[in-house]
Amino acid sequence: MSALAEVLQAVTDAETLANGEVDTAPDTLSLRQVENRFLGKTGELTGLMRHLANIPPAEKPGFGKAVNDAKTRLEERIGARFEALKAAERAEQFAREELDVTLPGRRPPMGREHILHMTMQKIKRVFSGLGFEYIETPDIEEFRYNFDVLNYPEDHPAMDEQDTFYITDSLLLKTQATAFQGHVFEQRKPPFRFFTIGRCYRNEAVDRTHSHTFHQVDAFMVDEGVSMATLKGTLGLFARQMFGDDVQIRFRPDFFPFVEPGVDYAISTQKLFDGRWVELGGAGLVHPNILESFGIDTERFSGFAFGLGVERIPMMAHGVDDLRLFMENDLRFLEQFR
């Protein structure tokens, strides 16, 4: 057999072998390996061209054509096989990802109300039931509403820059929710009853019972015949709604610039506090100076006001001993309140 015949037979054998491996390749990755093995730079078919030097000159064109034709046929076969395998793999992938719309959906994780928000919502329901109207109040307040109209003396320590966060000389982060009263007095004439819930800010060292930012409730009403008895009755109803029917309330004299007389009030229940008294907030009758400054006849009208910290309510109700836990966003703590 001539050298050309031997090389042409090698081309035929290589093509036959390649065709078999192409047809049996199980996936596109295996097919690419077959392609590289026979048609790569050092592939079996491509490598046959090294015999070109041993072929007589007159027969070299025929030999080159035979190798190139074999490579072309193999490339076409690989291309067709690749498309078939790719379609099969795509169909298999679609089958794996197929969605059964008849199956019940996966319930997404749901958030829950924060314990402070739950407390605020309960406070709103209680006060609304007592006939109080809710007012939303800003965090940034004018100096005069936070202090001047509330009968604060000019040398009161709360006005000091070391105790209050000032934005400008006339604007500050409100230190008490009571600041909303001046806005109401300017816009409404008695009789009325309002309450608000909002953030308050004070220059406090943060510890178990103090924070620079906290939430406060403030409520007040002005009407004919309002007295300390009216205040005590209202606070008693509020406390029973928040802490249970067995709650008792106690008043003790205290001083606040915006009320006269002023008291602090505490509550006690056998169930929650084992009979101990726990201070809840401050209260009193609206100071006559405030009523008169807004043109309200103090011979006819009187009023009461009281405030308390929102955080204090769940602390007492659930035995929480550290104020900071409410703001640390630790789910291990927050998920206890549902």
Image (cartoon, rainbow, N blue to C red):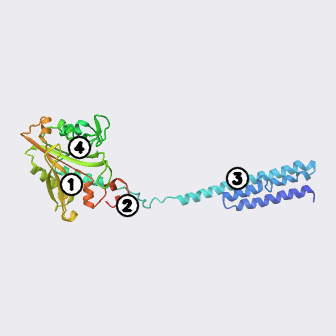
Which residue was labeled with disc 3?
79
Disc 3 to disc 2, C-alpha distance: 59 Å
Asked if labels 2 and 4 touch by Cβ distance under 8 angstroms, the answer is: no
Which residue was labeled with disc 2?
332
Task: Tell me if residue 113 can be seen.
Answer: no
Which residue was labeled with disc 4?
135
How many badges with numbers are in the image?
A: 4
Looking at the image, residue 226 sits to the left or right of residue 216; the answer is: left
When the figure is inspected, residue 274 is found, relative to residue 120, above or below; the finding is below
Quadrant of the image containing the C terminus: bottom left
Mark 4 or mark 3, whichever is nearer to me: 4
Q: Could you tell which of marks 3 and 1 lies nearer the N-terminus?
A: 3
Instruction: Classify residue 318 by image quadrant.
Output: bottom left
Looking at the image, residue 318 sits to the left or right of residue 79; the answer is: left
Q: Could you tell which of marks 3 and 2 lies nearer the N-terminus?
A: 3
Which residue was labeled with disc 1?
280
Dot 4 amino acid type? Ile
Dot 3 amino acid type? Gly
* Residue placed most toward the observer, 84 or 324: 324
Q: Could you tell which of marks 4 and 3 lies nearer the N-terminus?
A: 3
- Residue in the image at 25% along x and 60% along y: 317
